[in-house]
Amino acid sequence: MALPNTTTLPKLNFTNRFTTQLPADPRESNGVRQVEHAAFSRVRPATVPDPKLVAYAQEVVDFLELDTAFATSPAFAQIFSGNIQLGGMDPFAMAYGGHQFGNWAGQLGDGRAINLGEIQTSSGDHWALQLKGSGLTPYSRGADGKAVLRSSIREFLCSEAMHHLGVPTTRALSLVTTGENVVRDILYSGNPQPEPGAIVCRVAPSFTRFGNFQLPYSRQDHKLLKELVDYTIRNDFPHLGEPSKDAYIAFYREVALRTAEMIVHWMRVGFVHGVMNTDNMSILGLTIDYGPYGWLDNYDPSWTPNTTDARNRRYRYGHQPQVAQWNLAQLGNALVPLIEEDIPALQEVVDAYSDAFGTGYSDMLAAKVGLKAFEDGDDKLLTELQKILQVTETDMTIFFRKLADWSVEAVTSETTTTDLIAPLFEAYYKPAEITGEVEIAIAGWLKDYAQRIKDDGTSDADRKTAMNKVNPKYVLRNYMAQLAIDDAEEGKNGLVNELLELLRNPYDEQPDMEKWFAKRPDWARSRPGCSMLSCSS
Ligand code: AMP
Ligand code: MG
């Protein structure tokens, strides 16, 4: 593919540590196969007919030290659709395995992700660049390695939204349509349809997953296992020192603590990943692989967005902390051969995860309601809070923002039940249900809450400021992403970019954007893509 010779291509410093330090699959073809004794396979991204930029993230352009003029040039879309390679790129797909829905699935690997390479910026940071949807790799199994616009918009917007919410996540540089159709059966109803194809360029310090270690462990390939863990410690966890039994355990502990922190954030903002298989768990504790994820509209711990998970609800919102622990236990198993089978040391880390999550979760909930700190007696108040969020359908995001506005100073012994609840009314999906027991329960909690805040000595104004820093005003509700998808499928990219802009400042009041501070509309309750999502992407 030729570019006009007026185009200046960026000079990126490709370091490619993964491919230079780890064993490669000797075959360099994209054909589907089992790959043993190798951490990755070199592959070529498929070329696409007509790449067009839909959106890019300015912050990512900036930290990669690219310039904005380049990001909007035709060359950018050519490069980040895989049509043109920059000097220094060394494209490859990683080998990894994983437990899917609790069952060992064997080799999975980058079936539709192709890493272009890893760069180092002038600040010394390393960033791996990865195209999602660039065609077949040895790990594509029965599928085509492509991605559709619908799922690419969801990945692009959500990874950036999560970052701005303060949730550890992979990033997204760009979203490009390819000009070719990809056939998908969204509802698995035997009705496949052509959809526009697209490619997201994802960016992260490392894309290594729990499953990278599990795969050689499952094959008893302890040599490769050790090479991978040593590589990860040296490159991604250098502060742990040279690889040794102690360093392996310290590494495991750090992964566990980072994972606990990530899950606390998910719970704080109401994010449900939807496919917490061990191949979708990042070794750096980043949210990775945005597929059939969803956001809680009404607070419902039993909700899962993933249609494949509808029956067992393994990946429901309220179960995410336990699933992460189970996944960590699987990672621990994979490390057993490296730590002289010191099982108690691994168990200790699994317990440390529980403790870290438990403390982090209590502190997070306390912060969400504006307490200065979580104190011993607060368990009851916070458990009751979760009950009153469920006595009637309550919008999680709106509830916490309205609670920040709710005046403790105005509460007196004369305040009626109705007056107590009135300022929160916008958060309720079925206001007619706020009577009788329901009303009494909510008002009862609000009175206890007011007392606790008075004891804390926090003014309404200070509490509001503190709460609005941890309770977002805007999140990527499922229906919002769907509206952007509907437009983009008609060639209109305005809404994707409007939402990207909105979600840059999710904690700020944005008066022009108030329409997005609203409950899920009724039409979205049961529309595919809004309430339930399939893995078809
Ligand atoms: P996911 O559910 O996205 O985590 O994917 C699970 C596994 O299936 C990973 O190995 C993916 O690379 C692979 N996969 C998912 N979709 C495709 C696709 N369209 N083509 C090839 N491989 C895919
Ligand atoms: Mg995955």
Image (cartoon, grey):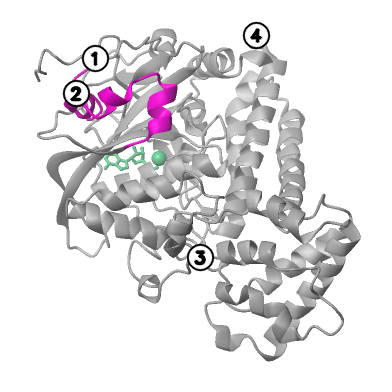
Compare residues 516 and 36 and report the one nearer the observer: 516
Where is residue 185, by image quadrant? bottom left
Of helix, strand and loop, which one carries label 2?
helix
Q: Which residue is mark 4?
A: 242
Q: Is residue 130 above or below residue 389?
A: above
Q: Residue at x 23, y 26 (%)?
A: 76
Return the disc, 3 or 2, that comes first in the chain's sequence.
2
Please name the amino acid that badge 2 sits on: Ala
Element class at badge 3: loop
Q: Is mark 3 within 8 Å of ligand 1?
A: no
Please report the residue visible at 68 percent of the width from the left and 61 percent of the height from the top.
404
Ranked by sequence position, the earlier of labels 1 and 2 is: 1
Q: Looking at the image, is 424 positioned above or below residue 144? A: below
Q: Which residue is mark 2?
A: 75
Assess disc 4: are there few (<14), some (14-19) or many (≥20) residues with their C-alpha within 10 Å of its C-alpha. some
Q: Position of residue 506 (x, y in %)?
A: 52, 49
For label 3, count other residues whose C-alpha is less than 10 Å away and answer few (under 14), some (14-19) or many (20+): many
Between circles 2 and 4, the one closer to the viewer is 2
The residue under label 1 is 9
